[in-house]
Structures are given as C-alpha cells and as structure tokens.
Amino acid sequence: MLASVSEDNAIELWDLTTGQQLRALHGHQGDVNAFAFSSDGRMVASYTLDNESLSINNPIELWNLDTGQQLRTILKHSSLIEALAFSPDDKMLASGNANNTIEIWNLNTGQQLCTLHRRFGFISAVAFSPDSKILASASEDNAIELWDINTRQKFRTLYGHLGIVYTLAFSPDGKILASGSIDHTIKLWNLNTGQQSLSLHGHPSPVYTLAFSPNGKILASGSADRTIKIWRIH
C-alpha cells in the first residue's frame, strides 16, 4: 500500500498491484507535516498544520484503514510535530517535536506515557527497535540518540553525519541502525558497539526515507534526487 497527500489535504491510499485508489481519508485542513503507518498496516497516524498560526493544538489523528474512520485524536502534545513512528507491537506512538522533546503515547488510551528531553534542537526523525524497547531519534544538531523505553533514559549518542538526519530504520534483527541525511549519505551503525560500520554514497541529494528487506540483507533508500536505490549490505 502507498499513501499520498492530495491538493485538498486528503490522505489517499493506493493499491500498488492495481494502481487503484483504495480509500481517501478526509478531515485535515492543512498540509500533512508528519505521517506513519502502523506495523500491521491497519492504522495510520497523521499530523497537519491546520492553520496559519501553527498552533500546537493541531491534533495527531489515528485512522482505521479498513473503515477510513478516525480511531482517536491526540490533542495534548507540547509542540509542533516533525516526525511520527509506531512501535512494532503497535502499542505506542512516538512523536518527535520542534521543542527538543519526544513524546510517547499509549495507543489504547491515547494518554501520554512519557516525555524524553534533549538539550537542543527539533526532532527530525524517530524509529523504534523491532522489540519496541529502544527508540532512536535524530535532531537538527546531526546527532542520533538511543533511548531505553523502560528507563526513559538516553544511553548512547551516534555522531558522524554532516547534516540533519531525516530518516532512521532498524534492521529486522535489531543489530543495525540505518540513517539517511541531507548530507547525501546513508550510514549503518553497529548497535552492539555504537560504531559506524558502513557509509553508503550514491545519492547526489538528501536521503529522506529508508527501509530494510524482511531478511535484513537489502536496504532501500529514497532521495530528493527522485531515485530509489537498492543496496546489498550483507
């Protein structure tokens, strides 16, 4: 399934096999600023800038893709939202905010579980590990931080990019973190050591999306250069 946003601010869902539109989700009055699919593909979360004042009261909307109906609205977030990510067990949603915080939400209740604070910078990307125990985040100071969800503490910071990181992806076994940046590079990080294991060069423009194959041997990257590159990393 593919999601796109139309000129009337509807989120449109497409069948990749037939090319036909499956459903359109209506309700937003402005640009979609952050968007995420649930792990089981049955929900999406979206956040839009619905008015000219850029109010922090614009909600996070949760949608049921089977019915096209809104499941829940999350209102009490603390800032403009730059990134969203579901946990693989679909019990939590992380929102990366413009006020250098990350908020974790319980999807069953819509209540906030915790807020993770960093010193500086808006949060540009968030991603959960496959076991939902670790959250990776990236910020405007080019750093990537790893957080323990149980203790709510940061336990590692990864440095190496020369520009903001806008996409993060864990390998299926949780041993590797991939990051893509406006510095045009993709970096692979060994999470046991915290060291960079590989730097991939090939995009002449910023890298905005990454995805591992189910076996973890292939990495796909999407860039502002309008290409998708396939990398064999094992």
Image (tube, helix red, strand yellow):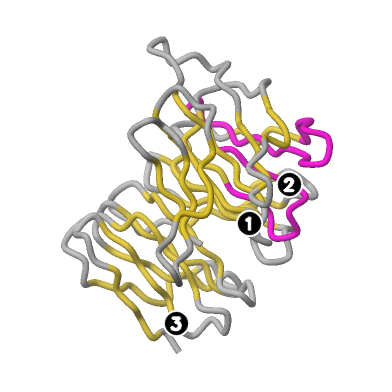
Disc 2 packing (10 Å; few <14; some 14–19; many ≥20): many
Disc 1 packing (10 Å; few <14; some 14–19; many ≥20): many
In the image: residue 130, left or right of residue 29: right
Identify the mark nearer the N-term, 1 or 3: 1
Say what secondary structure mark 3 lies in. Answer: strand
Q: Looking at numbered disc 1 in the image, what kind of residue is underneath it?
A: Phe
| Circles 1, 2 touching at the beta carbon (< 8 Å) | yes
Nearer to us of marks 1 and 2 is 2
Q: Residue at x 37, y 47 (%)?
A: 142
Whole-Å distance between the Cαs marked 1 and 2? 10 Å
Q: Find out whether residue 204 is within the magenta segment.
A: no
Residue placed most toward the observer, 10 or 20:
20
In the image, residue 223 lies at what x, y percent? 27, 59
Nearer to us of marks 1 and 3 is 3
Identify the mark nearer the N-term, 2 or 3: 2
Say what secondary structure mark 2 lies in. Answer: strand
Q: Residue at x 57, y 69 (%)?
A: 191
Residue placed most toward the observer, 96 or 228:
228
Reading the image, the residue beneath label 1 is: 128
Q: Which residues are magenta?
A: 85-113
